[in-house]
Image (spheres, grey):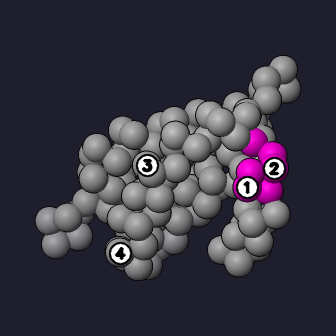
Amino acid sequence: FQQEMADLHLNFGRSGNCTAFLLRKILEKLIYIVFAKNGVESKLEDKNASGRLVGLEAMVETAAREKISGIPFLTPNTAKEIRGIKFLGDTSAHNPLTNVDMKTIFPQMPFIITAYKELAQRL
């Protein structure tokens, strides 16, 4: 995550579009790495497209279902709450007519930080 964190450091508070995209990217990458470190990355494979992964929404849902020692990678409540940062990241990357403002990201930060912590505990 060295490059993503350096990019986030440069953009956080300056560019809502870049920040939203990076927070989303870090989440997606962290989910994949946690699944891979636990030997269950195949659960993130898209069954309809060989060699591809499911989208972030499906990854988050899978992380809320998948458990190690009875504890999910993401608690269901955290999984529900981080939909906001997914939405903002998608908007920044895929909607050319809309910009993401930092004031919409700040309220999402407690949820994304919690998600990062829950996932990091499974590394």
- Circle on res. 12: 1
Tell whether label 1 touches label 2 (CB within 8 Å).
yes
Kindly report the distance in space between the C-alpha atoms of the residues bearing marks 3 and 2: 20 Å
Tell whether label 4 touches label 1 (CB within 8 Å).
no
Kindly report the distance in space between the C-alpha atoms of the residues bearing marks 1 and 3: 16 Å
Main structural element of the magenta stretch: helix, strand or loop?
Answer: loop
Front of the two marks 3 and 2: 2
Secondary structure found at label 4: loop
Q: Mark 2 = which residue? A: 14
- Circle on res. 121: 4
- Placement of the C terminus among the 4 image quadrants: bottom left
Bin the neighbour count of mark 3 within 10 Å (Cα to Cα): few under 14, some 14-19, many 20 and up: some
The magenta-colored residue range is 11-16
Of mark 1 and mark 3, the one earlier in the sequence is 1
Bin the neighbour count of mark 1 within 10 Å (Cα to Cα): few under 14, some 14-19, many 20 and up: some
Front of the two marks 4 and 2: 2
- What's under tag 3, amino acid-wise? Phe
Tell whether label 2 touches label 4 (CB within 8 Å).
no
Of mark 3 and mark 2, the one earlier in the sequence is 2
Front of the two marks 1 and 4: 1
Is 31 covered by the magenta stretch? no
Is 67 left or right of 57, judged from the image as shown?
Answer: left
Tell me: residue 11, above or below residue 18. below
Secondary structure found at label 1: loop
Kindly report the distance in space between the C-alpha atoms of the residues bearing marks 1 and 4: 24 Å
- Placement of the N terminus among the 4 image quadrants: bottom right
Secondary structure found at label 3: helix
Instruction: Tell me how many marks there are.
Output: 4
- What's under tag 4, amino acid-wise? Gln
Viewer-closest of 22 and 64: 22
- Circle on res. 111: 3
